[in-house]
Amino acid sequence: MKKRPIKKVRKQPKQAWIWVFLAILTFLSFFLVKNQLQGKLICANSISCVKDLSGHYEANRVGVFQGSQVLAPEQTGPESVQEEVLGEVTQGISKHIYVDLTSQRLSAYEGSQLILYAPVSTGKWYPTPPGEFRIWTKLRYTRMTGGNPTIGTYYNLPNVPFTMYFYNSQYPKARGYGLHGAYWHNNFGHPMSHGCVNMKIEDAGRIFEWARVGTPITITGTTPVE
């Protein structure tokens, strides 16, 4: 008697929808992780997003910049800001600040008179946007925090001096772009910021006392890659 051949049981292929589901899940996971990392850079001053507008000087002067400890300068001058005139015009003469991303230079004019020409440091880890802006608040001191510790760009800096936050319709106030003094580096003339415009403290102090809420800031050019 002949033995009947044993039929091999054919495995049923996995349903196509399972593979589609897994592919979609993988894509969404990657997208969410990527956005979570980039989300820390939504604001120039990203973690705090300009929540504290008190201008107070903090007793704790210890900060962090790119994994290194930095020390804020001791307090000099009052915390409060006196605004003699609100707006960009003082005694009928227009004040205007220009930032050239290409040359990493700032020019401040009162009418046709050049008041200050100084090196700055604009966005290296996150771009400083070009455009037409206006100063919306001035803070003698403020804390700035942001960056990403996983890639070594985290910063937490108390008592950032002479901060002038600026905005326009495309980049609202909550984005936290500002022009301010920087004590944590001395590489002015080269990109060094997370989107703000860094200045030497003495230069920032001059602009801070001279500019007013409403003073226009024009940012042009392209930040060099270094």
Image: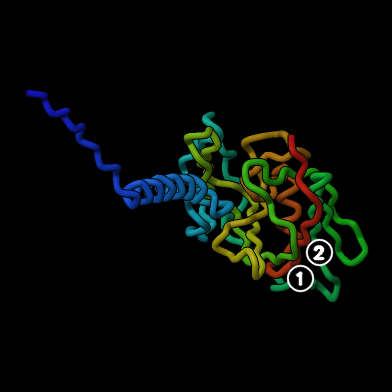
Residue 69 point in image, percent of width and height: 52, 30
Label 1: which secondary element: loop
Q: Quadrant of the N terminus?
A: top left
Residue 153 occupies which quadrant of the picture?
top right
- Judge left or right: residue 79 versus residue 189: left
Task: In the rendered structure, find residue 180 and report the number of the disc placed on it.
Answer: none
**Which residue appears at 81% of the width and 64% of the height?**
96
Residue 120 point in image, percent of width and height: 75, 44
Residue 148 point in image, percent of width and height: 50, 40
Label 2: which secondary element: strand
Q: Relative to 18, does residue 137 appear above or below in the rendering?
A: below
Residue linked to disc 1 = 88
**Which residue appears at 72% of the width and 34% of the height?**
187
- Judge left or right: residue 155 versus residue 12: right
Kindly report the distance in space between the C-alpha atoms of the residues bearing marks 1 and 2: 7 Å
Q: In which quarter of the image is the C terminus?
A: top right
Residue linked to disc 2 = 96
Please report whichever mark, 1 or 2, sits nearer to the chain's N-terminal start. 1
